[in-house]
Image (spheres, rainbow, N blue to C red):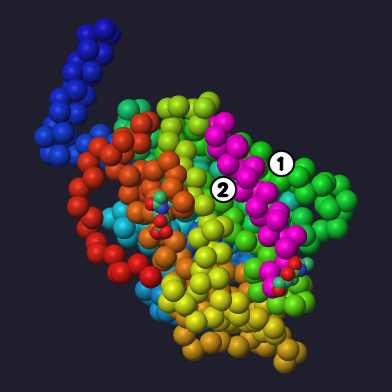
Amino acid sequence: MARRHWIGAAWLCLLALGLQELGIARGEPSAIIVFGDSTVDTGTNFYSPATPFNFQANRYPYGFKGFQGQATGRFTEGRVIIDFIAEYAGFPVVESYAKPDASLAQGANFGSGGAGALDDTNEGMVTPLSKQLENFADFCGNVSKERNLVEYEEFLSNAVYLISIGSNDYLSGYFSHPHLQQAFTPEQFVTLVVSNITKAIEVLHSKGARKIVMFGVGPLGCLPPLRIVNGSGGCHEPATALGQAHNYALGLAIQRLRQIHPDSIIVRAHFYDFFEERQNNFGAYGFKEPAQACCGAGPFHGRGHCGIESVDPELSYELCEEPSSHVWWDPYHPSERVHEQYAQALWRGNATVIEPVNLEQLFHSSSPSGRMENPGTPSFAFPEMI
Ligand SMILES: *[C@@H]1O[C@H](CO)[C@@H](O)[C@H](O)[C@H]1NC(C)=O
Ligand SMILES: *[C@@H]1O[C@H](CO)[C@@H](O)[C@H](O)[C@H]1NC(C)=O
Ligand SMILES: *[C@@H]1O[C@H](CO)[C@@H](O)[C@H](O)[C@H]1NC(C)=O
Ligand SMILES: *[C@@H]1O[C@H](CO)[C@@H](O)[C@H](O)[C@H]1NC(C)=O
């Protein structure tokens, strides 16, 4: 028995040497694993037939400027942030786990448009974070069948996990349900949401995740429908304040997680300032329209359903000529250009947008230190960052 172990260990050791000779450093990223909402969904709702139409992006004009020229379930006119990150990392498209023939060797996307950290958020219509984690457990089961234990653990610890969730808990949850506002103060509700995100990160860690990126939320009150609520065209301050409170509480939770898990790199991606800067100084980033969505109905195109005709002319959607000149694609979702600029900022940006390391460093670091192991040369050229 002991002899078999020794031989096994020696063999692994040789294998590791062999890999290093090939220039493949340990810590090389193995996969991109995604959880969250419409900011990252690459087809989960699309392939979940029971999803109601207002939580699907399965019709023109969704995706009409995208790499396939047709709707793919992404909530923009084209690609979403995960597509750009995968490209920069040299990975294939991260397909939804719900896609029947998905190729999942280098990643899986569990994100679902409309999802929240709380099960009650858009309940029964979307795949909540808790169910996304169950699906991830299934995925792990499949991954483990194809690998021995060492390979399995390395696959999970060298994967990069991205989580973008929270907005829907406030917009479709707290603000849409007076009973929640009666039952919880804003502070209590934020604590509920953030503690469930913390739980999710703990679940991932317990399964072997060591490189985790947690996204904050943006200025929620600047969504086109909330500008309508404001009445004078500005952002709806109470929603924005709740988003800020969320980001603050999330920051504290992440600090604690980092102390508890020094074996991991837990990265925080800030979205609030990045997005606000594009709303305020839109011209400097290539946008012409910061407030009105490209696709929608009514004031700021904050009403109706993009791509769905309505008998009520006030709810019949209009489509702008050039989505990339708009910050907002539809009433609830930023345009592809925002996704692309954010992906660029996360990939190579500084601590104002992502810390303690950026995505380029994270992908090339060997956990847990976050040090650059093998920066290499990027396999793509950035367009000039505007
Ligand atoms: C929080 O998440 C867990 C699973 O991670 C889930 O079981 C639980 O129901 C969630 N809590 C709420 C209030 O939604
Ligand atoms: C994962 O395994 C389950 C059974 O354990 C199977 O039904 C499913 O098709 C597998 N999924 C993939 C993508 O291999
Ligand atoms: C509405 O927007 C204006 C700016 O145009 C702002 O001063 C005001 O505080 C906002 N009101 C609310 C309730 O958010
Ligand atoms: C961080 O990046 C932003 C945006 O590119 C830039 O304005 C800022 O000066 C940078 N800060 C530092 C400390 O390098």
Q: Tell me the distance, in whole angstroms, between the alpha carbons under discs 1 and 2.
A: 21 Å
Task: In this rendered view, identify the residue nearer to me: 263 or 159.
Answer: 263
Q: Which residues are magenta?
A: 234-257
- How far across and down, in percent of the image, does residue 90 sit? 28, 55
197 left or right of 136 in image: right
Residue furthest out toward the top:
2
As drawn, is 55 to the left or to the right of 101?
A: right
Q: Are the residues at dot 1 and dot 2 in contact (C-beta closer than 8 Å)?
A: no
Residue at image coords 45%, 27%: 262
Q: Is residue 253 magenta?
A: yes
- Relative to 4, is 40 above or below? below
Question: What is the magenta segment's predominant secondary structure?
Answer: helix
Q: In the rendered view, does 30 fall on the left or right side of 82?
A: left
Say what amino acid the circle numbered 1 marks. Thr
- Residue at 16%, 34% in the rendered image: 20
Question: Of the residues under marks 1 and 2, which one precedes in the sequence?
Answer: 2
Select label 1 or label 2 by which is in front.
1
Q: Which residue is mark 2?
A: 132
Task: Tell me, for residue 261, which label it has, or none.
Answer: none
Residue annotated with mark 1: 191
Disc 2 marks a residue whose amino acid type is Gln
Q: Residue furthest left?
A: 21
Viewer-proximal residue among 377 and 96: 377
Residue 57, quarter of the rendered image: bottom right
